[in-house]
Image (tube, rainbow, N blue to C red):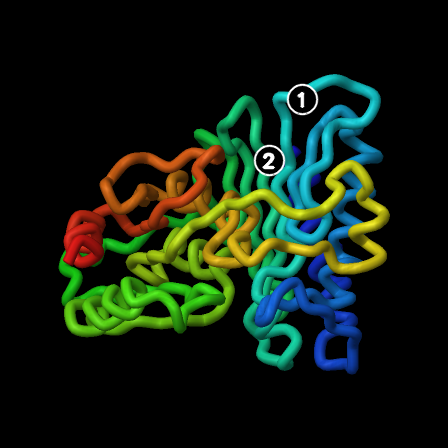
Amino acid sequence: MLNFAIQTARDAGRILLERFGRAMQISRKGDIDLVTEADLAAERMIVERIRSYFPRHAILAEESGVSAARDAGPSEWRWIIDPLDGTTNYSHGYPCFCVSIALERAGEIIIGVVYDPVREELFAAEQGAGATLNGRRIRVSEIGDLNSALVCTGFPYDVRERRQFARNFANFIMHAQSVRRDGSAALDLACVASGRFDGFWEDFRQAPLNVNTNQLGRSFGEAPVYSESALQGLKLWDVAAGMLLIREAGGRVTNSNGALLTTDMTETQFVASNGLIHDDMLRILAL
């Protein structure tokens, strides 16, 4: 199934590149969050392919919401899909975006793939088998001092109302070597796994979608409607593949209390690192 996820991510990335830089139809899921026709086209392809090859698997996709397995009861298998992570970048012609596909079995992520079609970089991981970039094994960095670390984050859509986020951001600027914000959490996590970044943090808030999740076609025809509370942080489709990549590359993923994160998390602070600077990052977030 790893090869299936890899090929599907590559094909979705091809769809994104074909439309990149062209005039396109853009809809809004809220005051700031966007969805493009490329999101919908890539997701349609991914979902249809999963339905064809794995009809008994459930799906959680960013644009179409939650879908149960076809012709079956509850499934222990669930595909978690972000067809275009970095939509704002993409819609502005900024070449920092990716496809993220993960497979969960019985509550554990067992496959994770993040594909950057611009750089043709394919990050992949399988539970217990390590993580790779274009087929070569990757490991997290060996930076052990936060003062020498390059860390990254993402801005929540309601950042103007988040005093805690501004405080955390300022504290990391003062204590890390440097801070980046590239606009694609899935790529950020892949960069932590490959040692390019040493750590990552951002608010995670998984909220129900106000969409008929049993009617995928409706979601593909128009952007689903999200409650404002659902737009206030990372979602599972942003981080599922990246979580496995980092763990398989020797890193650490927790909440701000140091507890391991699972796919049923709701509201938490998402913290990922090479493991060596993790406690220092937690300390900064507690200030």
Q: Amino acid at mark 1?
A: Ser
Residue 103: image tag: 2
The N terminus lies in quadrant: top right
Label whose residue precedes the other's in the sequence (2 or 1): 1
Q: Are marks 2 and 1 in contact (CB under 8 Å)?
A: no
Image vertical order of residue 130 relative to residue 9, above or below: above
- x and y percent of residue 202 in the render? 37, 57
Q: Answer yes or no: is residue 119 visible.
A: no
Judge the density around disc 1: few (<14), some (14-19), many (≥20) Cα neighbours within 10 Å.
Answer: some
User: For residue 47, what is the image quadrant?
Assistant: top right
Is 149 in front, or is 36? 36
Secondary structure beneath dot 1 equals loop
Q: Residue furthest top?
A: 73
Q: Which residue is mark 1?
A: 75
User: For residue 55, what is the image quadrant?
Assistant: top right
Judge the density around disc 2: few (<14), some (14-19), many (≥20) Cα neighbours within 10 Å.
Answer: many
Q: Answer yes or no: is residue 174 visible.
A: yes
The residue at 63%/46% (across/down) is 209
Is 65 in front, or is 106? 65
User: For residue 3, what is the image quadrant?
Assistant: top right
Whole-angstrom CA distance, mark 2 to mark 1, is 12 Å
Horizontal placement of 71 versus 154: left or right?
right
The residue at 71%/46% (across/down) is 211
- x and y percent of residue 20 in the render? 72, 75
Residue 167: image tag: none
The C terminus lies in quadrant: bottom left
Secondary structure beneath dot 2 equals strand
The residue at 47%/58% (across/down) is 232
* Nearest-to-viewer mark from 2 and 1: 1
What is the number of callouts on the image?
2
- x and y percent of residue 162 in the render? 35, 65
